Amino acid sequence: MLIVISVLCYALFAVAAPEVQLGKTKLIGRDVTGLQQDFFGGIPFAEPPLGALRLQRPVLKTDIDADEFDARNFGLPCLQQNLDTDEMSEDCLTINVFRPKGASSEDPLPVMFWTYGGGFSAGGSSSFNGSNIVAQSVTRGTPIIYVNYNYRLGPLGFPQGQEADNRGQLNLGVRDVLTALEWVQQNIGLFGGDKTKVTIFGESAGAMLTNMVLLNASISNFARAAISESGSASSPVIYNASTREINWEYFVAGTPGCESVAGTQNTFDCLQAANSSAIYQGFVEAYELAIEDVAFYPVLDGPSGAILPDLPTRLWVKGQFATIPFISGTNLDEGTLGLSTTTNFTDENIKNYIQTTYSAFPPYLSDTILDRLLELYPDDPSLGSPYGTGNETFGLPVGWKRVASMTGDLTFDAQRRTWTQTAAQAGVKAYGYQFTQNSSMGSAELGIHHAAEIDFVYGQLNSSSEPASSILLSEMMVDYWVSFATSLDPNDGLGTSRPFWPQYTPENEVLLQLNGDNTTVIPDDYRKEAIEFLWDNADAFHRTYGGGFFAGASSSFNGSNLVAQSVTRGTPIIYVNHNYRIGPLGFPQGQEANDRGQLNLGVRDQLAALEWVQENIGLFGGDKTKVTIFGESAGAMLTNLLFLNASVSNLARAAIFESGSVSSPVTYNASTRESAWQNFVAGTPGCESVAGMQNTFDCLQAANSSAIYEGFVEAYALAIEGFPFDPALDGPSGLLPDLPSRLWEKGEFATLPFISGTNLDEGTRFLPTNRSYTDEDIKDYMAATYSPFPPTIPDAILERLLELYPDDPSLGSPYGTENEMFGLPSGFKRVAAMGGDVTFDAQRRIWTQTAVQAGVKAYGYQFTQNSSLYLSEWGVPHGSEIPFIYGTLNSSAESESSILLGEMMVDYWVSFATSLDPNDGLGTSRPFWPQYTPENEVLLQLHGDNTTVIPDDYRKEQIDFIKDNAEVFSR
């Protein structure tokens, strides 16, 4: 026995081990037996994420503190469930390289960079052996280098909660991806790789991460192409970090030694001091208690977060993504794998399942959407997944195939199609596929399930158990993938003979069906109506919406519930909404725009839409003489802006303003924001040379949409304000000839009846939670926010503001919360009160008082109803009335009083639109809403448990002061 071992050892090491010099360290790899390849594994690409570096952004490892490093094996995978403790490690940020033998820096090879899947909670690079891909790349004459790596998982890779947000330590697993790519840029040349020819690819969560990094244009510095197998950036259900706070608390409470800090905003210190064994116990506990299967997803990390500044679909709509070529596809039956086989999927059970899976936290899916989903995916097994199996149900529960179809589309197919269509519209070179090949490794009831393509892509099929057509398909797929990685085209003509794969374009939306017996081109139109419905309701599935003169779309607001209740109450209405241009395209700034008379275009879009209504609404059964215009936030500001022009009386007879007036935005002459315009021009490729000049329009009009979007992004990134493209003063003949406060004083406004109101805590939602608010900080913040350009707010005004809003949490916003600070910075509630009044409450009161003095019929409200949709530290925030107005509250999550209030508010709004009085007596029984008059300045407090009339005199001294200094605040 000893002799045999000696012989084997001698044979194993008879071939000289490959070496690479990485800085001062010699990496010792190993020969890949029989394949003429070298392997180098377990190379650290980042500092070990332990101790003080646990729960921190990865730190690129620039050198290894050793003369030699054993790189003969893969590194251990990161901490995860279902592995023995000796099979994983927190010190897991390692990278692996497979290269053809003889590769050198003198003739560098393209690189394929793989990211594994596993639901952001499992997986490791050691499960993916790229040697067959490398081998076939060599055989076909286009050799590549294959790289994969580990990234952190679960709570260590994707922390949740407000503390992680405040510390800027979100999406660490995504940052691991970027750091591994940075390591490749710095070092792959040493292995014979070409850093300018990197293709990133991945499957499932790996595809989602791959697509996610494409949301940042800077990825083009790291990669030139991408392949996403069964996953996109919008596949996971994405929230703000604070939404899944409870999952973070489970993790902390389950970590021995840290139980006492669970529920506080000071957990990181304890977690960083814990040992890996304790961390793992917390890891397991968190997953056991979580209400979702995937408890630690990527999260929104704010405008400065750079990873996920907004929901992916919002970023797609705005064109905010890298324009590198890509392949994206799905498998035929994405929804079957992992679906419970013990649940009877009745209609009600399906609605509950979809709700908990795609809307576990508010805002919840409405019954209207769920009912429509059931209609689009009928209870017909022949239409369900696995597709093409007729009425066969495989002994599975009732409705199983129906739900598998729904979830496959919701998570994978709809997102793949939406992303591909959006990118192709922007001119991105894209290819799409649908994988439809059965395999002996699957089961009949799962069909062509999620991840079934992986063995084909990796060339790992067993030729003794798979048909020749499957083996051939695998070879073809490797050739398509390698051809794309080496030439940016899957059709290089090398390797196996295979069908031509056409590019996916707006004029030719086609997929390559990957099937061993029938690889062919098919139209990308399967389940068209259902998938369009999912896209149109992306907001409901936590995938879109907008506002603030720089974001938003009419598709985010479904008026069907308003219309339905109007019919039920006997006063039917027609609901209309519209899009308007935003940012620099809707609100150009600068002297040139002023000279050309091209200011406030977004407002003119609104007027044009109203003109269209006047000309055409009769064809739809509408009365053009009875139009009520209404909007929220920027929509309310635009609606109120129209009132500064008496001619609006020809287009509408009434208005409703929710949380916004024309004086809410900081208003200047167009030339004041000249720098914002020049940032836009300079950021638009091809127009850099005319930046700073007064002849920019010609160049901008000649640019394509992709270039315009780059300028759009650059302008916001460089702006010194949060809202650099607000409406501008446009002179005597314009829409905004003077500051609103001056026009109001002169009585220059339409005298149409209106409703105007605000929410209790308008200032909380916009306020940064990661800064201090000392007196000096507050003065700086207020000056920067309300007078970013000269004349700046005088110090005397700021001092008086501090006196009027004292440093007393019990007086701050959210109101009525006494001294509770919610773990927020000192002074947060104080500044939230100031900001809410300056921007919203003061402007609402001043406008209403001014209008009623002129005899205008007006009604005022204050919305004070809490909702499960919003954080307690926000109180009753800006925008929180919208689900009540639109009747989209979730009856299973909200109190009966909230549901009733929603019905009452729809009745008030519809009553006013149909009779110019919110008190028509029809519909729900509700309190009388008195008119706001000079003699009776009152509001209706809208609250489920106490809708009542209150005087409009809250914070009177403060708001009077703001009114008296309106022009100081650029109003």
Image (spheres, grey):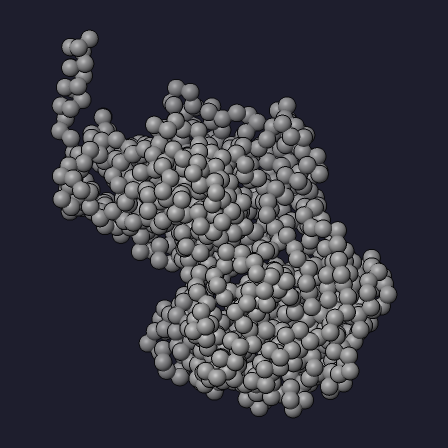
**Residue 824 x %, y %:** 50, 59
Q: Is residue 952 visible?
A: yes
| Quarter of the N terminus within the rendering | top left
Of all residues shown, which one is farthest toward the top?
1
The residue positioned 48% from the left and 37% from the top of the image is 254
Please give left or right for residue 279 compared with residue 646 in the image: left
Residue 87 spot, x, y in % from top left: 35, 28
Q: Residue at x 37, y 82 (%)?
A: 693
Q: Residue at x 73, y 74 (%)?
A: 951
Q: In percent of the image, x 37 and y 44: which residue is there?
A: 272
Q: Nearer the viewer, residue 501 or 343?
A: 343
Query: Does residue 165 appear left or right of residue 180 in this picture?
Result: right
Residue 344 vertical position relative to residue 49 in the rendered view, above or below: above
Q: Can the viewer see residue 123 in this picture?
A: no
Does 780 appear above or below 34?
Answer: below
Q: Is residue 265 above or below residue 81?
A: below
Q: Is residue 886 left or right of residue 116?
A: right
- Position of 326 relative to 624 (above/below): above
Q: Nearer the viewer, residue 834 or 733?
A: 834
Residue 464 image point, x, y percent = 39, 19
Quarter of the image for residue 246 reads: top right
- Between 216 and 287, the residue placed more toward the observer is 287
